Amino acid sequence: MGRQIRLLSRIGLCNLFGINEIRYTKDRKKKIQYAGLAAVWLLLLLVYLFYLITLSNGLIAIGLGSIVPMYFYTLTSLVILCFSFFKASSVIFQSHSFEMLISLPVTEAAVIISRFWTMYLTNLLLSLITLIPGMILYGSRMHSGPLFYLIFLAGTLLLPLLPMTISTAAGAVITAIGARMKHKSLVISLLTILLVVAVMAVSIMSQEKLGSTATVTEEMMTNMAVFMQGQIGRLYLPAVWFNEAAVYGSWKSFLLLAFSAILLFGLFVGVLQKYYGRICQALQSSSAKNNYKMQSLSTASVLKSLWGRELRRYFASSVYVSNTIIGYILMAAAAIGIFAAGTQRMAQFIQIPGITEKAIPLLISFMAAIMPTTSCSVSMEGKEFWIVKSLPLRSKDIFDSKILVNLTVACPFYLIAVIFGCLSMRNDPMMWIWILLVPAAYLWFMAVLGITVNLAVPVLNWESEVRVVKQSASTMITMLIGFLSFIPSAACIWLLPQISIHLIFAITVIVLIGASIVLYLKNNRKKLINLE
């Protein structure tokens, strides 16, 4: 079985990252695309590491260095939990390849273990990239001995197991529930989103408790460390075991960490193996009623027909829905949270000098621009894109339908955000205009930008939707440009408080609308036949 696991894992990694295409393609354009994707990932990684290093240096400087390993371990585990949760059901339960694999002389156990092994290796890479710089930084600053490095490396190898088990178990339950229902993808998407929102709410409440400890003096350092350790312990107990093992050399804590991670992971894989075939078969099945009656047929315009087609395609993919709609949910949730907590408390929670309640339109817009549906809408056509290209359709109509889907999905959450944002700023009616216009301008800009970037770097030859939605160059570049587009406005609000907030928002809206028009006209000149 070991040979089967190795072969299946190798194939899974090649499909997930497009490794064979990178190695053997002779298409210069594709090589440039992969190089650009690598550059984007590197930039995001450097930003992430800069944040971690800056934070750990600050904790060490104020005397809270003893909790740095625990903080790194918790943060990395949460990142892995989120990444694994969104892709677990797609990677573990690849129903489209289930029949092919089950017909081969391989065991179900080999299929399950190979897919977990694929996820483990990708998450381990993230753990190593994050924790090794943290280990070197902490070890050099705190003059740790060889035992610290040994336990730190061993704990890093164990780190992905628990987040993977938790996220995959939740994904398996959601997938099993949704597989029994008529609209499987929609039910799975809704359950996934509800769970993610619940986890984020718990995380935010924990952060608020950590940030509400008033002014810290030197006499309070020890108590502060104990308090933060207790808070993180309530959030993620294995991080406390890791901290006690690495910092204080407690072998008992390390054995608890290792035993719990390996035992829970092994038990879950054993239980999943029993129901794996049934879940995959249920995901492939479809239900239909036998009471079909012929009624009058109706026609619609080209744009309306394409819009309906795009909506059906969108809601047919739980990975697509759960990864793109979460930003719009957060937009509405942020506005409701600001209204419930009050604008002054919001400014205190952000804890950035100069950022006050006047920045609410920008905050709501930032949530809305996390990941538009258009960032991978062209790539989601996949190998069936030739059907669209062969039809007598204008590229403008196809792109407009994809933009309309983005705006359709975002519109209900946008309206909720606008209503509660205006209620939060009831004492400043002038801000109502910007709460209405700034998020709308960003929604339009990000929808058009997603089409532009996806046309530049499409991925049509894919096996797993995870590769298109979460790992494609188009998604990463769109998110990066969206993030960078907020920097000028935020910098003006932060660094130039003497400038009128109304002038800043007016310029922001004009620039976004102008950029959207330019990109929109450029997209409509594209010829679909040239896309490969």
Image (spheres, helix red, strand yellow):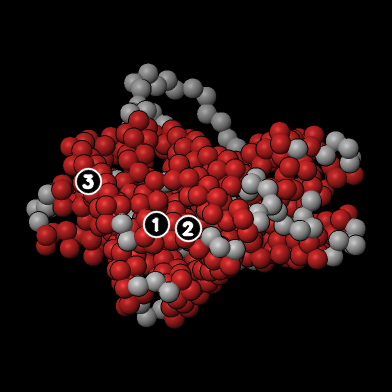
Circle 1 packing at 10 Å, graded few (<14), some (14-19), many (20+), is: many
Residue ID for mark 3: 263
- 416, above or below 37, in the image: above
Mark closer to the chain start, 3 or 1: 1
Residue type at tag 3: Leu
Q: Quadrant of the C terminus?
A: bottom left
Circle 2 packing at 10 Å, graded few (<14), some (14-19), many (20+), is: many
* Label 2 element class: helix
Q: Quadrant of residue 14?
A: bottom left
* Label 1 element class: helix
Residue beneath the point at 27% across and 57% down: 251
In this view, the residue farthest toward the front is 219
Q: Are marks 2 and 1 in contact (CB under 8 Å)?
A: yes
Q: Quadrant of residue 416?
A: top right
Circle 3 packing at 10 Å, graded few (<14), some (14-19), many (20+), is: few
Q: Quadrant of residue 525?
A: bottom right
- 188, above or below 165, in the image: above
Q: CA distance from mark 2 to mark 1?
A: 7 Å
Mark closer to the chain start, 2 or 3: 2
- 73, above or below 88, in the image: below
Residue 410 in the image, given as x and y percentages of width and height: 63, 43
Q: Which mark is residue 67?
A: 2
Residue ID for mark 1: 243
